[in-house]
């Protein structure tokens, strides 16, 4: 009989990320973490090396669009725009990494759910991975279609003088925090073939929990070196959140 591993249920989304940190490096789980970890290291490491080299010049150019009578705001806006740039790079390259690692992240979520609930671990063969690939990639495309129209609207807002340099960076962070939760929570939902709209609506019912989880993921993805380890930890944390708060709700799947 498989051994059941219990997590301590919490209502804090942030708490689930740190619970994921404990789960990701437990015996048995580590082998499922390895490939997503390597993919994340290569992509985010390269992206942040580029960003840190060019960030200052990009922000100075952006601030040059401020009207002269608002130049005094540049000291306040510089850090806000730096955060907006970090958020943009973090989400963009995390999305690419998640597309590449999606089959392995789904397998990690499936294995961890079985471990947490005392079920038989799934088939982790290469054949099983290939069989699920079309469905997994289709789901990633669904998430991208949900993301793009809203992201484009916010990016347009960023080019409006004054508003684009003040309100838009905050909205951009909140939106990307929400998308981080969508991205990682979707792995266990998708393993049970829960339709995307139902997954999204379930997360909306616990919006504070979802946003706090996504905000921690977003913030740590912006931190060099730390961000290299975020992906598998976030998958584990989101899976624990699914087991405690959503699994019973979707037993019909």
Image: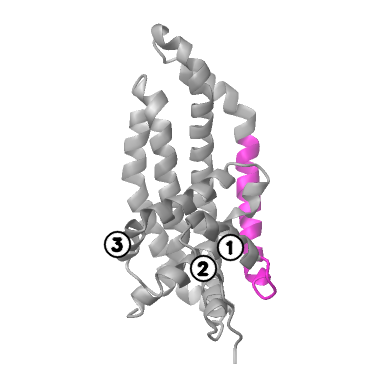
At x 50%, y 39%, the residue is 87
| Residue on which disc 1 sits | 20
Marked residue nearer the N-terminal end (3 or 1): 1
The residues colored magenta run 25-50
In the rendered structure, find residue 240 and report the number of the disc placed on it. Answer: 2
Residue 231 percent location from the top left of the image: 57, 56
Q: Quadrant of the N terminus?
A: bottom right
How busy is the neighbourhood of tag 1: few (under 14 within 10 Å), some, or many (20 plus)? many
Residue 176 percent location from the top left of the image: 43, 45
Apparent side of residue 195 relative to residue 38 in the rendered image (left or right): left
Q: Is residue 200 on the magenta stretch?
A: no
| Residue on which disc 3 sits | 197
Q: Is residue 93 above or below residue 52?
A: below
Marked residue nearer the N-terminal end (2 or 1): 1
Q: Tell which of 92 and 116 is nearer to you.
A: 116
Of marks 3 and 2, the one in the foreground = 2
Marked residue nearer the N-terminal end (3 or 2): 3
């Amino acid at each position: 009989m498989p051994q059941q591993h219990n997590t301590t249920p919490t209502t804090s989304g942030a708490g689930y990320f740190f619970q994921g940190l404990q789960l990701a490096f437990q015996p048995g789980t580590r082998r499922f973490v390895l490939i997503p970890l390597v993919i994340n290291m290569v992509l985010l490491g390269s992206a942040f090396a580029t960003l840190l080299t060019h960030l200052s010049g990009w922000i100075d150019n952006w601030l040059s669009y401020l009207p002269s009578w608002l130049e005094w705001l540049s000291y306040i806006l510089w850090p806000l725009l730096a955060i907006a740039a970090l958020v943009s790079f973090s989400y963009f390259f995390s999305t690419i990494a998640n597309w590449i690692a999606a089959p392995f992240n789904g397998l990690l979520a499936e294995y961890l759910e079985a471990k947490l609930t005392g079920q038989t671990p799934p088939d982790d063969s290469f054949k099983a991975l290939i069989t699920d690939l079309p469905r997994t990639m289709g789901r990633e495309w669904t998430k991208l279609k949900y993301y793009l129209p809203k992201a484009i609207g916010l990016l347009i807002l960023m080019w409006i003088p004054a508003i684009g340099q003040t309100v838009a960076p905050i909205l951009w962070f909140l939106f990307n925090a929400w998308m981080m939760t969508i991205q990682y929570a979707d792995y266990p939902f998708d393993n049970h073939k829960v339709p995307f709209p139902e997954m999204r609506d379930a997360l909306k019912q616990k919006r504070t929990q979802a946003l706090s989880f996504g905000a921690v993921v977003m913030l740590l993805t912006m931190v060099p070196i730390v961000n290299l380890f975020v992906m598998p930890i976030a998958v584990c944390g989101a899976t624990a959140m699914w087991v405690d708060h959503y699994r019973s709700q979707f037993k019909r799947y």
